[in-house]
Image (tube, rainbow, N blue to C red):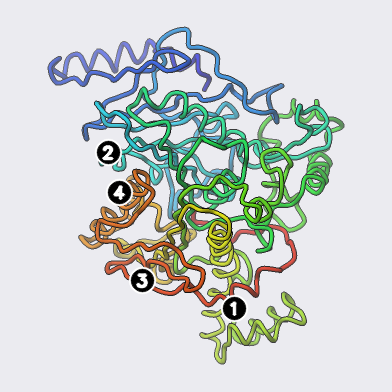
Amino acid sequence: MTAKSRFRTSAFALANGMALMTITAPAAAQEIAPVVRIDAGQVEGKALPSGVNAFLGIPYAAPPVRDLRWRDPAAVQPFAATFHADRYAPQCPQPSRNAMANQYSGAEVTSEDCLYLNVWAKPGLTKAPVIVFIHGGAFFIGAGSMPIYGGETVAQRGAVFVNLNYRLGVLGFLAHPDLSQESPHQTSGNYGFLDQIAALRWVHDNIAQFGGDPDNVTIAGQSAGSMAVLALQASPLAAGLFQRAVGMSGAAMRSTGPFALRPLPQGEAEGLKFQQLVNADSLAEMRNLPVDRLTLPRVPGAPAIGAIQDGHVLTAPIETTFAEGKQNDVPLLLGFTRDEALGGFGAIDGLADYRERAAERFGERADLFLTLYPAQSDQEARMQARLADRDSTMVAPMFQWALAQGARGRAPVYSYMYAHPHSYAPDVTFSDLDPATAGAYHTSEVPFWLGTLDSFNQYRHTRAWTADDQALSTTMTEALIAFARNGNPAGAGLDFRSFDKTKPELLKLDTVSRQAPWPDSRKLAFFYDMPLAPIVVRNVQD
């Protein structure tokens, strides 16, 4: 959907919808649509029954189509008339989800014209803290329109909430030597990060019109969104655009291996492999391909298209930027979930399989690994494999992030482990999750931080939330807003403490939250020097 199409009102809607509203709704009961004026012109949102105003599908960059495919985001053209921001824009192109998946979000309309953001705010605010949330999805799925990422609850409690779409997959992260040659900064790839930076510039320039403080912006993200938060903290292009950062289960520090960022030459080589895959003779031909031809197969040996250390968004390896104290030095809240496990071993048949895979994966270091993660039975082997997967892909990178910020940064770090399983409806089943064994799975913390528990019952009843669930969510949302307001999440019944590398502790978030030690640093150190490997994500829940 283009920006222009959002101005049109169909004859069908006039004849059927509006006429029906006129007959059935007394004029006094009709909500007055909120209107604000931003840089591009006048925007009309909608007033929600909760008292929050929602402005959905506002363009923050020009549609990245045709010649703008694989270029830096371009400026939005001024609106010719009032822009009606009363519905979500399409998702960026991505695979559709199974209707029986845990986080099914309804019909998924996609378009390459997808660079839009959403704003929720209570009327009458001034200088309110702003939270900009970056969705997860391994950089190939996800959208701001997914109900789990909604901002109504956060806005009800006094913050301005923004989320956004950004280019994904090949459209968002293709590096290619011809793209680098035509670029004014002689690099390519990381277009998704450039989209996020463009959205933050839009927030800086326009959020005051919604009651937000452009000088008090918190960026937050989960999974790939958390990796994006780390990249933005390390990027000079994002300097001054945010004052706090929240990372939930995702970091790309070079020394942690599986999710590390490759340098530009390797990214360009993978881009050439993709060009061969689609059988295109030139960059111009690739720009003319239908978008459905640009899907990256998620199979071993496929081109590794993803975030890279490109020399522009990321001028140096992330750990180097932090080691030199050149990161955007802002208060940081980061953590992981107790039972998430991505990549690595995956499903283990039993003890013998565990030991064989350890030998294949770690070679001469296998004995050390089995000492750190010992198992004497099939059950212990499966448990230890899952624990090792969690530590290698999530805990070790998040710990490195905390250490890196603490080494040269002056701003404090607060950390957590989310350990509260969801409460499921009786006999509910999913295509991608077993409620009996899921525990505190990857992404399970997001609805608690954002107050979006009800999103799981929007399309079918999958959760039977309890009073304890609701209370924990309220407390976590208040802590997030407190952090956005003043850089400290403590309060609201949560005893957050500043990270201390000499005695690393975190806050274990559960029905009763308490301080607990980080996982054994000897285990985490084992994974720091693992060689780079293709990113293979299993059991993705984000």
Gap in Å between the C-alphas at discs 4 and 3? 29 Å
Q: Earlier in the sequence, mark 2 or mark 4?
A: 2
Q: Are marks 1 and 4 in contact (CB under 8 Å)?
A: no
| Left or right of 93 on screen, residue 124 | left
Foreground of the two, 136 or 92? 136
Q: Amino acid at mark 3?
A: Gln
Q: Are marks 2 and 4 in contact (CB under 8 Å)?
A: no
Q: Are marks 4 and 3 in contact (CB under 8 Å)?
A: no
Question: Residue 466 at x, y = what percent?
Answer: 23, 61
Circle on res. 158: 2
Circle on res. 515: 3
| Left or right of 63 on screen, residue 18 | left
Query: Which residue, given by chain and number where applicable, does mark 4 sit on?
Result: 454
Dot 4 falls on a residue whose secondary structure is helix
Circle on res. 197: none
Gap in Å between the C-alphas at discs 1 and 2? 42 Å
Foreground of the two, 472 or 158? 158
Q: Is residue 26 above or below residue 207?
A: above
Gap in Å between the C-alphas at discs 1 and 3? 20 Å
